Amino acid sequence: MSPAVTEAGLLADAGLREEVLRCYLPHCRYLTDMHVDQAADTVEGQATLSIAESCYIQDTGHLNAVEVNIAYNQMLYYTIARAVRDRLHPVFADWSMEDYWRRQLADILIVHLSSTFRAPIDRTAFSGSFTLRRARQRRLRPDRPATIMLDTAFRFWDAHGGSCSGQVDVAVVVS
């Protein structure tokens, strides 16, 4: 069942978030809350994130590029899960939640990621935004199923003026 709708948009769903993040090791679950809204042909999310300890390097004192990629992935996975479950975007209209769980790791691929850091971000407490700007299906070869191409953008910031933003192209293999 879908979460309640408020004037601010669709509420976060902690149970779904936990299911989406289950594929991550417990200490690598950075997404602590996320609200998702539908606006025309876009799907947007606002997130709260926290990284207590890096999963691969000694403390750098700030959010780094690897952690940005992981945090982005978690926002992407949660947003797609919400888009499927709550029918927020027509490109996922034929998907069931079972389709999503089957495809989450194997079929959702980052094609291109670019990020720009403007000021260091405190990794222990930061916010994020995710925007699914455009989604379309295209057939890369006549003998292959269509691929869903997602044009997305993200931004991370903290209470001290830290800032990072980027654009990510994602391919979803439809098999």
Image: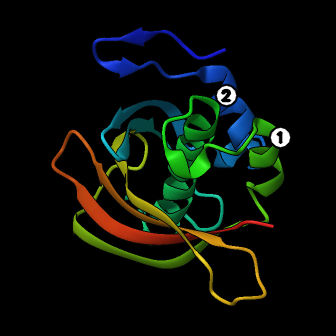
In this view, which residue lies farthest toward the left?
161
Location of the C terminus (image quadrant):
bottom right
In this rendering, is residue 105 above or below 31?
Answer: below
State the SS at label 2.
Answer: helix
Is residue 14 visible in this depiction of the protein?
yes
State the residue in front, 67 or 136.
Answer: 136
In this rendering, is residue 73 above or below 145?
Answer: above
Q: Residue at x 41, y 37 (%)?
A: 47
Return the x and y of residue 4 as percentages of the image width and height.
49, 9
Q: What label does residue 98 carry, if any?
A: 1
Q: Residue at x 74, y 49 (%)?
A: 24
Q: Residue at x 48, y 40 (%)?
A: 50
State the residue in front, 7 or 69.
Answer: 7
User: What amino acid type should be assigned to the residue bearing mark 2?
Assistant: Leu
Direction from residue 68 to residue 70 in the image, left or right? right
Return the x and y of residue 32 as percentages of the image width and height.
53, 32
Direction from residue 129 to residue 118 in the image, left or right? left
User: What amino acid type should be assigned to the residue bearing mark 1?
Assistant: Glu
In this rendering, is residue 138 above or below 12?
Answer: below
Question: Can you tell which of label 2 and label 1 is closer to the viewer?
Answer: 1
What colouring method underlies this structural image?
rainbow
State the SS at label 1.
Answer: helix
Mark nearer the N terminus (2 vs 1): 2
Return the x and y of residue 35 as percentages of the image width and height.
42, 28
- Residue marked by disc 2: 16
Q: Which quadrant holds residue 152? A: bottom left
